[in-house]
Amino acid sequence: MRVISTERSQILAARIAGALETTVVDVQFSRFPDGELYLAAGELDDETIIVGSITDNDALVQLLLLIDACDTSTNWLVIPYMGYARQDKRFRTGEPISARVIARLFGRGVASCITVNIHEKKVLGYFDIPASNISLASEMGNYIKSMGLDDPLIIAPDDGALAFARDVASAGEWDCDHLEKIRLSGSEVKMGPKKLDAASRSVVIVDDIISTGGTIATAAAMLYHQGADNVYASCIHGVLIGGAYAHLKANGVRDIICSDTIERGCSRITAAGQIAAALRSG
Ligand code: R5P
């Protein structure tokens, strides 16, 4: 068994290979003059773990090409970050169910699929192959423990993230609560009033995704307004588009932490251990 990955998931793939005591496959990536993607996989074993986060459209195509390049092997797919998963239903007439479209692309060439903190678990049901999800809540909780904060308050930015926040908080038996978020547009949110005991406390806002940073920046402003001493942000998938990291720092967020499902300078939590465990158990 060997591990192979797209360009965007090389570090996580190497960590998974390390955890499974195997090696990664060398892959050559390039583009044709017209921009089309090209790749060539090195020597494969008879079993392959294919790792690729869908961070953008190129990453999606590269993952599909990689699966085809591995068609002499029995393959297990890992999609650490599944882009398009947030469009998990038709919010307005005429829209596609994008998460379903993406999931259905992976019906051939792989035996099963593992995702990490997928935005909505129901998306797993859109795959034509067995699909399961792992959560890095305990890894995030352990990382927060290592920060040495004095009795932090763990906050979910909305009630959808509350179950995850509770799982994170259970690592240290910390208090946990949620804000109420109203989305105004793709990049703007406002927080509805919610009574929180954030005064004079360190607060860690936890979410599955930080994309533009709008949700966390708004939440942080509200928490500072309520007297919080320090606000931190931690997410699984650091999408961090359009200067989101700087936007959060500029808005007083002391530190931003994410996992390596998307490889960033602030990826301080690894999904490798849990992915390896899930692959081992099978
Ligand atoms: C949405 O429901 C997700 O859980 C995140 O809260 C959202 O994707 C964050 O987006 P942004 O950083 O752009 O506010």
Image (tube, rainbow, N blue to C red):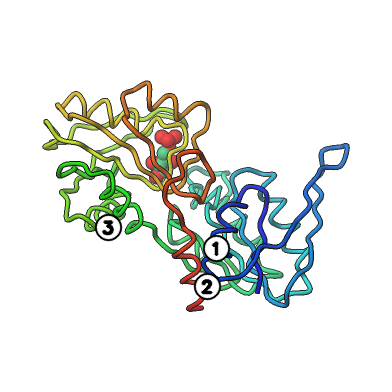
User: Which labelled disc corresponds to residue 279?
Assistant: 2
Q: Residues within 10 Å of mark 1 (few under 14, many from 20)?
A: many
**Disc number lying in front (3 or 2):** 2
Distance from the alpha carbon under mark 3 to that under mark 2 = 22 Å
- Which residue: 55% across, 48% down? 84
Identified by mark 2, the residue type is: Leu
In the picture, measured across the screen, residue 123 lies left or right of residue 46, that is left
- Which residue: 14% across, 37% down? 196
Secondary structure, mark 2, is helix
Secondary structure, mark 3, is helix
In the picture, measured across the screen, residue 234 lies left or right of residue 70, that is left
User: Which labelled disc corresponds to residue 281?
Assistant: none
Find out whether the residues at labels 1 and 2 contact each other: C-beta distance under 8 Å: yes
Q: Residues within 10 Å of mark 2 (few under 14, many from 20)?
A: some
| Residue identifier under label 1 | 16
Residue toward you, 74 or 93: 74
| Residue identifier under label 3 | 167
